[in-house]
Image (cartoon, helix red, strand yellow):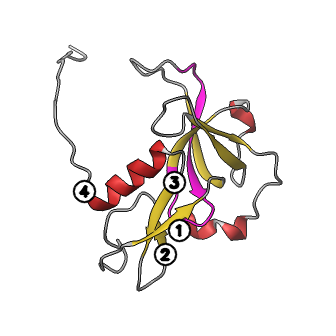
Amino acid sequence: MTGIVAPARLDYVYSPGRAQSAHLDALAEQRTVGERCPSCRKVYVPPRGACPTCGVATSEAVEVGPRGTVTTYCIVNIKAKNLDIEVPYVYAHIALDGADLALHGRIGGIPYDQVRMGLRVEPVWTDGGRHPDHYRPTGEPDADYETYKELL
């Protein structure tokens, strides 16, 4: 025997809380909002309500982006079930302008083999979408490594 198929299903309800609710509400308006730590002054996106470094509560909302920089990425060559995206495609960590933590997003509008660290990108929204469909190149020069190396 080399394997076994065991279908599984898990239904759950997610309650986002104050910080995540503000973030999700902003995404519905095609904006990205994080929160700044009052101690270290870092801006975290998505916000969690507390600084992961200092452990203190955060409440100061900060709008970031919409543009950002690809800090790392991977080329995906395996088609996922129920995902209508042709392989290969690129999934990246993107440091939005003004944020101190990279978030995840798919890169489109460019051949997969031309994506690189430092690539400047912007979100592409779909009608009625509650988050960016993907990020595409802005046409700006690549960001200097020194500007994002701490976000790797």
Residue 152 visible to an observer of this rendering? no
Dot 2, crowdedness within 10 Å: few (<14), some or many (≥20)? some
- Rendered position, 58 above or below 9: below
Q: Residue at horizontal 53%, vertical 42%?
A: 105
Report which residue position mark 1 lands on. 100
Q: What kind of element bears circle 2? A: loop
Q: What kind of element bears circle 1? A: loop
Report which residue position mark 4 lands on. 17
**Residue 99 counted in the magenta span:** yes
Q: Gap between marks 2 and 4, in whole Å?
A: 21 Å
- Rendered position, 140 above or below 131: below
Q: Residue 137 at what x, y percent from top left?
A: 73, 42
Q: What kind of element bears circle 3? A: strand
Instruction: Tell which tag, 2 or 4, sits nearer the viewer.
Output: 4
Marked residue nearer the N-terminal end (2 or 4): 4
Q: What kind of element bears circle 4? A: helix
Report which residue position mark 2 lands on. 42
Do the residues under discs 2 and 4 have CB atoms within 8 angstroms?
no
Residue span colored magenta: 85-103
Marked residue nearer the N-terminal end (2 or 1): 2
User: Is 110 placed left or right of 75 in the picture?
Assistant: right
Residue 6 visible to an observer of this rendering? yes
What amino acid is at disc 4? Gly
Marked residue nearer the N-terminal end (4 or 3): 4
What amino acid is at disc 3? Thr
- Rendered position, 27 above or below 69: above
Do the residues under discs 2 and 1 have CB atoms within 8 angstroms?
yes
> Which quadrant holds residue 11?
top left
Report which residue position mark 3 lands on. 32
